[in-house]
Image (spheres, grey):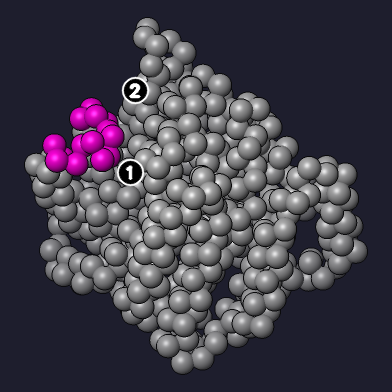
Amino acid sequence: MMGKLRNGIANLPVALKASVAFFFSSVITSGISYITTPIYTRILSAEEYGRVSVFLTWLQILGVVAMFCLYMGVFNNGMIDYPDKRDRYSFSLLALSNIITVLFGTVFLIIYPFIKSAMGLSYPLIFLMLAIFLFQPAYNFWVSRQRYEFKYKFVVLFAVLCAVVSPLTAILACLYADYGERLYPRIFGAEIPLIIIYIGFYFYIAKKSSFKVDRSFWKAALLFNLPLIPHYLSTYLLNSCDKIMISKLVGDDATAYYSVAYSVAAIATIVWNAVNSSLVPYTYEKCKEKDYKSISKVVIPILALFAVVCLFVIMLAPEVVAIMATKDYMEAVYVIPPIVGGVFFQVQYYIYANVVYFYKKPRYVMYASVLATAANVVLNYFCIRIFGYLAAGYTTLACFIIQAVADYVAMRKVVGEDVYNMKYVAALSLAVLGISLCSNLTYDYPVVRYALVVLMIVCMVIFRKKIIGLISAIKKK
């Protein structure tokens, strides 16, 4: 029996095995994150938890400029363009990233005294950020290359290692801190072990390339990524500016509640992130052949299954929040449905952008992201002031819809036709949107919610043959 199972797994296409491995890796690592969240919400005050969220938000936003996101779209293009020079390409882009980080850090430290009050971060936290920006790209480049080449074993191993070591060190640092405030032990305890791991990968990549940098790669990488920086920045702002604005307009306590709600919604995101990493090379290969029907046949079933995941997260949100935090955080449950709905529209960016990136037209994606982010900042400024922090979930949902529509238009402009079955995408989108807007009405009636969950499970059992057929179709691609 076990022999047949091993043989069956061994005979699976490498792309499928990689997708499955990345998925379970994401489930494990995110599962560890969700296990530690209830610990953090109990050993940190709501104010401290909110300040940690603000630090992590600034880390993401500033990292876009400081690291130039060279490990993202442009790196996958480099894997295609330079198949025999991947070692040299990786280290060359790592060196370029470091140069950009040093220039960014110099300018930032000069102007920081003038913006310190607005950011609310101390100098030790700023220097920690700069250290992360310097060494983290090495790990990101390594992971991106391993994923592109479907080499999943060590990626999974190090992902789990990081997911265990970082929070464990942070929790121990908080518990054994000699003073009352636990903000520094929480942040430094989590990040220092990761920096040590990043340094190891830095020297690994450097040694693989014999410490040689080829500057001929730099110009193309800079020209490709320069128009994408506003896009990447806008994307992170669209995901993160809510927390910064809530912190400033309402307070750190409200930021903590909203962050817990966002963590629950992120359960759906881990599924898509695992799958999309393997969809990128598949999409690129099929775009080469202009075989758009094959792309649609693979992506549409995955999008449908992702919609089901979103619905389960929405229906079970009160129970998840009760596990992850104390009763003080329970009011945050009402912001989860629009956030999860926003996540569904957010992933549509990926299915459109994957195609646009292949054709090297990144500026179209940038226009969509900047438009959505500008709308989000304006809506948040007025709606949070009027309706409180819960309004941020609905403004985010609206802006992710704007981004999805704009990215679809961009893809259509670049390709000249629909790559996907858009009638099916529209039907799924309307279903998820309707449930996102109405499900709050069921949270005070657990029996109704449980009945809906049971109904979804029964439908999945009834239509299991079709679902298995969809999965089998994906496996054949």
Q: Nearer the viewer, residue 202 or 166?
A: 166
Picture quarter with the C terminus: bottom right
Identify the secondary structure beneath mark 1: helix
> Can residue 17 be seen at all in this image of the molecule?
no
Q: Is residue 77 above or below residue 175?
A: below
The reply to whether the C-beta atoms of the residues labelled 1 and 2 are less than 8 Å apart is: no
Q: Which residue is mark 2?
A: 184
Q: Is residue 174 above or below residue 317?
A: above
Residue ID at (20%, 67%)? 222
Q: Nearer the viewer, residue 164 or 91?
A: 164
The image quadrant of residue 410 is bottom left
Q: Residue furthest top?
A: 178
Q: Is residue 37 above or below residue 81?
A: above
115 drawn magenta: yes
Q: Which residue is mark 1?
A: 58
Query: Mark 2: which amino acid?
Result: Tyr
